[in-house]
Amino acid sequence: ILTGDFNLNLFSNDVNVSKLLDLTESFNLVPAFNEATRITSVSCSSIDYMFTNFNPLIKRKQVIHCGISDHSALVISFQISIKKHNTCVKIRSFSRKNTLTFKEGIRFEDWTNVFATDDVSQQMFNFSKTIYHHFDASFRF
């Protein structure tokens, strides 16, 4: 959806209107409305646009002339179906027993693999891998 006050009258034969429509059409965007959006006592024009590339899904569209502004409001509703996915939510139990298991696991861990290298990045990787191992073992899904 592309929307806005383009200040180009769709009802005119202005070359800039043609350029705008050619540009939006190159992105498969077409105007959703072909009605006046700015009405005065002496003229009416269509200078506010709402372009969309899914016109078949339009459920309802409306131009609202509310009198608050010299421009009208454009309202559009789409018929979109949302597929429901069965979501399986996994949770971990952070019980006292599991927390003690985790603490004991890291307390009795042999951390020599962390210091077996001088490469700080490798040390961090080994440390994280060990922590994640104990975390996953202690706080199962």
Image (tube, rainbow, N blue to C red):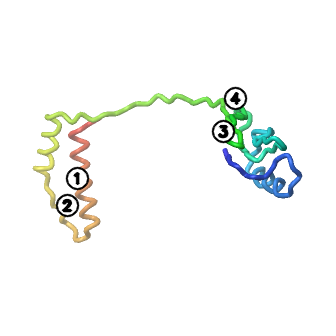
Q: Secondary structure at mark 2?
A: helix
User: Which mark sits nearer the N-terminus, 1 or 3?
Assistant: 3
Q: For this view, does 98 lie left or right of residue 34?
A: left
Q: For this view, does 127 lie left or right of residue 26?
A: left
Observer-side mark, 3 or 4, equals 3
Q: Which residue is mark 3?
A: 68
Q: Which mark is residue 113?
A: 2
Residues tagged 2 and 4 counted as in contact (Cβ below 8 A): no
The amino acid at mark 3 is Ile
The amino acid at mark 4 is Lys
Residues tagged 1 and 2 counted as in contact (Cβ below 8 A): yes
The amino acid at mark 1 is Thr
* Quarter holding residue 73: top right
Q: Is residue 109 above or below residue 53?
A: below
User: Which mark sits nearer the N-terminus, 3 or 4?
Assistant: 4
Q: Secondary structure at mark 4?
A: strand
Q: Secondary structure at mark 1?
A: helix
3D distance between C-alphas at marks 4 and 1: 55 Å
Where is residue 77? Give x, y as percent: 66, 32
The amino acid at mark 2 is Asn
Q: Which residue is mark 4?
A: 59
- Residue at the far right in the pictured view: 13
3D distance between C-alphas at marks 1 and 3: 65 Å
Q: Is residue 100 above or below residue 85?
A: below
The residue that appears at 24% across and 64% down in the rendered structure is: 123
Q: Secondary structure at mark 3?
A: loop
Q: Is residue 15 above or below residue 33?
A: below
| Quadrant of image for the N terminus | top right
Of residue 106 and residue 17, the one placed in the foreground of this image is 17
